[in-house]
Amino acid sequence: MRDIESLLPDGKGVWIPIDHGVSDYPIKGLENLEDLIQSISHADVIVAQKGVISRYSSLGVNMVAHLSVSTRHAGSRSSDKILVGSVEESLSRGAKGVSVQVNMGSPDEPEMIERLGMITQDAHHLDCPVLGMIYPRGENLDIMDGDTTSAAAHAARLAFELGCDVVKTKWTGSIDSFKRVTAAVPIPVLIAGGPAGSSTEETLTTVFQAMQAGGGGVCMGRQVFSHESPSKMVTALRAIVHEGADVKQAMEIAGL
């Protein structure tokens, strides 16, 4: 698989999505993308939209193209993530992989699943890694009785069975429940950032717990780029994900 080891060293990754400016803007931390990218260049991957990749992939960071878009202005269709690019185009712009989002339980879920399948098909032929951003959160979400993961395990399974090489989904709130997510698939499971407003220590504690449950790392945006020190936050995340540090050690290593 093209570049997979550089994106996920030893099957683990600190991935930072900065694509949020398409859905909403202005957003704290995304005002100067060049400065931001340089400050977090020690992340394993930066996930961004194709125009950003064309402009900044020359900075020497691994970039993955997020192909799914909606904006806050779409009303009842704001959860419908449409495709705005292809695998071939993304690679030509300097991307090392691609990313597609599915909102499980959305009225538009069938079309989003179809789009994911189209991208994994093309990615297979072009030897390109695929991240599935799968969020179980739509109004039609039907959680099975006894599912302590609130459909996060199903989200991971959907990504794997449709050909994704890595999946991003929500943190389930406990080590025991997240173990059911990581046990559901043989691909790395990256956790999303969770609710806005969490403290640095709370965010890092969640990451530490996810790793204890067999997680593959993080795909975390606002908790990094809106942080007072994005660079130090990436350093702390790397300490937990790649070095096995606990929260206190990670904060000391990063100077937080």
Image (spheres, grey):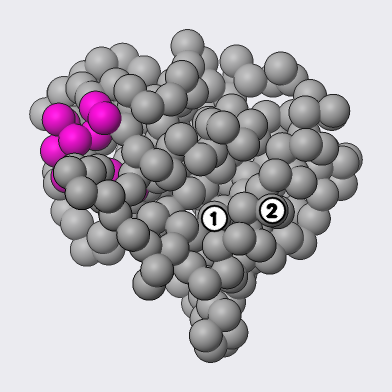
Reply above or below: 34 against 214: below
Reply above or below: 84 against 37: below
Q: Of the residues shown, which amino acid type is indicated by label 2?
A: Glu
SS state under label 2: helix
Label 2: few (<14), some or many (≥20) within 10 Å? few
Which disc, if any, is residue 219? none
Residue extending farthest front: 145
Q: x, y percentage for residue 253?
A: 24, 25
In this rendered view, identify the residue nearer to me: 70 or 60: 70
Reply above or below: 104 against 179: below
In this rendered view, identify the residue nearer to me: 31 or 100: 100
User: Are the residues flagged by discs 2 and 1 in contact, CB closer than 8 Å?
Assistant: no
The magenta segment: 170-180
Mark 1 lies on residue: 102
Mark 2 lies on residue: 114
Q: Is residue 174 magenta?
A: yes
Q: x, y percentage for residue 131?
A: 58, 38
Q: Of the residues shown, which amino acid type is indicated by label 1?
A: Val
Regarding residue 229, the answer to whether it shows in the image is no
Q: Is residue 78 left or right of residue 154?
A: right
User: Residue at the spot x=17%, y=53% of the render?
Assistant: 199
Mark 2 → mark 1, Cα distance in angstroms:
10 Å
User: Residue at the spot x=34%, y=44% of the render?
Assistant: 152
Which comes sooner in the sequence, label 2 or label 1? Answer: 1
Quadrant where the N terminus lies? Answer: top right
Q: Is residue 162 magenta?
A: no
Q: x, y percentage for residue 241?
A: 33, 24
SS state under label 1: strand
Regarding residue 78, the answer to whether it shows in the image is yes
